[in-house]
Image (cartoon, helix red, strand yellow):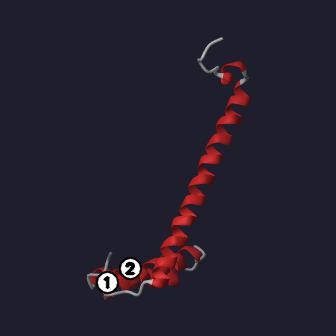
């Protein structure tokens, strides 16, 4: 008997190996998405409970919400996309670019 692990992938066909690799990558992506959602929920909770102490902090919150809004816009809604971009430009010009 040996303490060395057996590489089972060597004993399977290429299709089975690729399927296993895909399952592993998918599990990793799902885990990353879950972690990202948890971090996003934590950030939003903190933004809700901690009031901004300056215009700069308020601008950070506004940028976050504007990014959420812009992400929900359909690609053909160029007018609203341009408005969001103009606001980001305004923040940068006013020194609140983040």
Q: Position of residue 2 (x, y in %)?
A: 62, 13
Q: Quadrant of residue 97?
A: bottom left
At a point 32% along the width and 88% down the height, the residue shown is: 55
Q: Which residue is at the far top?
A: 1
Of residues 11 and 88, the one drawn nearer to the viewer in this rendering: 11
**Residue underneath mark 2:** 60
Kindly report the distance in space between the C-alpha atoms of the residues bearing marks 2 and 1. Answer: 6 Å
Task: Report the side of 63 relative to 76 (left or right).
Answer: left
Seen in the picture, residue 28 relative to 11 is either above or below; the reply is below
**Residue underneath mark 1:** 56
Q: Where the N terminus falls, by quadrant?
A: top right
Of residues 55 and 45, the one drawn nearer to the viewer in this rendering: 45
Seen in the picture, residue 63 relative to 16 is either above or below; the reply is below
- How packed mark 1 is, by other alpha carbons closer than 10 Å (few <14, some 14-19, many 20 or more), is some
For mark 2, give the secondary structure.
helix
Q: Position of residue 37 (x, y in %)?
A: 57, 65
At a point 57% along the width and 80% down the height, the residue shown is: 77
Q: Quadrant of residue 41?
A: bottom right
For mark 1, give the secondary structure.
helix
- How packed mark 2 is, by other alpha carbons closer than 10 Å (few <14, some 14-19, many 20 or more), is some
Task: Report the side of 57 relative to 49 (left or right).
Answer: left
Q: Note whether residue 91 is visible.
A: yes
Q: Are marks 2 and 1 in contact (CB under 8 Å)?
A: yes
Q: Note whether residue 66 is visible.
A: no
Which numbered disc covers residue 87? Answer: none
Seen in the picture, residue 18 relative to 71 is either above or below; the reply is above
At a point 73% along the width and 23% down the height, the residue shown is: 13
Of residues 88 and 80, the one drawn nearer to the viewer in this rendering: 88
């Amino acid at each position: 008997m040996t303490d060395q692990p057996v590489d089972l992938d060597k004993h399977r066909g290429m299709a089975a190996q690729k399927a296993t690799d895909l399952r592993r990558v998918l599990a990793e992506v799902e885990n990353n998405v879950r972690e990202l959602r948890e971090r996003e929920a934590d950030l939003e909770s903190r933004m809700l409970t901690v009031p901004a102490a300056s215009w700069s902090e308020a601008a950070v919150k506004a940028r976050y919400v504007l990014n959420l809004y812009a992400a929900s816009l359909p690609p053909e809604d160029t007018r609203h996309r341009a408005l969001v971009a103009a606001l980001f430009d305004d923040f940068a010009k006013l020194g609140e670019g983040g």
